[in-house]
């Protein structure tokens, strides 16, 4: 069973049902039923037209549910509009569906959560981690969003800012999480950049390209993480870096700075350094100051503390870190790094061990565990 194929077809099938007048919650239920049926049937009898098969089955599941629910009997007249058999349309509806899910009836945070769950393919746990909230809290938020849009027609698309937030979070999860969605996020952002002249759309595309350019160097052959300072820069994709920098420069020329442009500027400074030692950390701190002013995001202040530690020394970094919420994910790992730089190896080793226990994924946990073991070995010499 090709789970990647099923995941890639889901947004288009969902979009077809929504455009035919089915409310979002009912359409999502129907598509999920169709996916379950596909898992059962396809291994023994794969369809020639997977998208058309899913659309037909999802439509029939919706009709079955409508007939079973007296309150939905009015939808029975949609039977005559059942999609015809044969190849389905090849039009990519994914980006349009992102806009439709960012419905004006929802708050931006609810719209992002709903779209990530229904269209982006992320789990509730992954979305909760991105938002720094408990999984139960995020599950309630998504349920409320579904209830809000249930019964509404999706004919008033949401704003660009909400869609950008969704694409950014999908890219981040694809870049560092369990499901590879980074390339899909870049593809959709390219489509959006081609459709509208918006500096933040361009900024997000530049940011994605600059981060994705380093992907091949982020892991060793055994799958372990390679920190930025230790990466083999010859493995970076120079073509993507050049494209990202060009797009960023054009966006900054509009003089309408936004958070994605600021993040892309930081990524560009990392990409521009021939070696880790030649990184312009002073400029990076200045861009983090701009980013903190634009967003007020506590994670920005956490990352800024690392940059301050590189620009002005580990003591200055620890002073900056002292103003940050110590419950943030990766706070302990940052503290460990700065204490190691400051020469306090015993404390750094202990903090690396604590950080490993808090790590969100196996690769990060293993990396932090190795850091602690390295410092403990040094302490025994």
Image: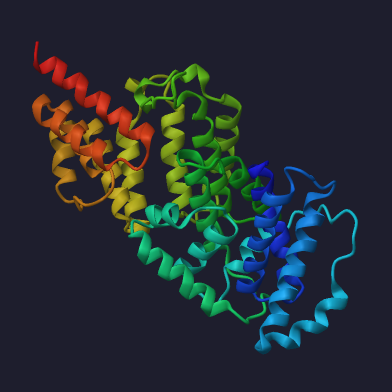
> Quick one: which residue is furthest to the top in this view?
381
Q: Is residue 241 left or right of residue 91?
A: left
Q: Is residue 339 visible?
A: yes
Identify the residue at horizontal 52%, vertical 24% (top origin).
236
Q: Is residue 94 visible?
A: no
The N terminus - image quarter? top right
Q: Is residue 61 above or below residue 76?
A: above
Q: How many marks?
A: 0
Q: Is residue 172 left or right of residue 99?
A: left
Identify the residue at horizontal 69%, vertical 81% (top origin).
68
Q: Position of residue 5 (x, y in %)?
A: 69, 44
Q: Is residue 113 above or below residue 104?
A: above
Q: Quadrant of residue 346?
A: top left
Q: Is residue 343 above or below residue 251?
A: above
Q: Is residue 295 left or right of residue 353?
A: right
Q: Position of residue 368 (x, y in %)?
A: 27, 30
The C terminus - image quarter? top left
Identify the residue at horizontal 46%, vertical 20% (top origin).
233
């Amino acid at each position: 069973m090709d789970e990647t194929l099923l995941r890639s077809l889901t947004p288009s099938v969902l979009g077809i049902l929504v455009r035919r007048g089915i409310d979002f919650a009912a359409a999502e239920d129907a598509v999920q039923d169709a996916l379950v049926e596909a898992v059962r049937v396809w291994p023994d009898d794969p369809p020639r037209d997977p998208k058309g098969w899913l659309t037909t089955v999802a439509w029939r599941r919706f009709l079955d549910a409508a007939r079973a629910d007296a309150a939905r009997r009015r939808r029975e007249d949609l039977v005559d509009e059942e999609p015809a058999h044969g190849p389905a349309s090849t039009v990519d509806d994914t980006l349009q569906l992102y806009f439709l899910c960012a419905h004006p009836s929802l708050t931006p945070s609810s719209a992002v959560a709903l779209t990530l769950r229904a269209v982006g393919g992320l789990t509730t746990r992954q979305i909760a981690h991105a938002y720094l909230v408990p999984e139960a809290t995020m599950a309630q938020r998504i349920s409320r969003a579904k209830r809000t849009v249930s019964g509404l027609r999706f004919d008033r698309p949401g704003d660009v800012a909400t869609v950008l937030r969704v694409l950014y979070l999908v890219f981040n999860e694809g870049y560092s999480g369990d499901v590879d969605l980074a390339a899909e996020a870049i593809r959709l952002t390219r489509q959006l950049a081609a459709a509208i002249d918006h500096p933040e759309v361009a900024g997000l595309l530049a940011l994605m390209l600059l981060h994705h350019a380093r992907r091949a160097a982020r892991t060793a052959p055994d799958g372990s993480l390679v920190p930025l300072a230790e990466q083999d820069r010859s493995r970076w994709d120079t073509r993507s870096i050049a494209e990202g920098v060009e797009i960023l420069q054009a966006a900054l020329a509009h003089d309408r700075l936004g958070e994605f442009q600021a993040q892309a500027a930081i990524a560009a400074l990392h990409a521009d350094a021939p070696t880790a030692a030649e990184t312009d950390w002073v400029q990076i701190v200045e861009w983090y100051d701009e980013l903190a002013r634009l967003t007020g995001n506590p994670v920005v202040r956490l990352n800024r503390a690392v940059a301050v530690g590189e620009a002005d020394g580990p003591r200055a970094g620890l002073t900056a870190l002292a103003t940050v919420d110590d419950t943030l994910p990766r706070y302990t790992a940052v503290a460990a790094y700065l204490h190691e730089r400051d020469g306090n190896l015993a404390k750094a080793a202990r903090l690396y061990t604590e950080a490993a226990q808090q790590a969100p994924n196996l690769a990060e946990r293993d990396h932090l565990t190795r850091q602690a073991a390295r410092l403990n070995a040094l302490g025994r010499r």
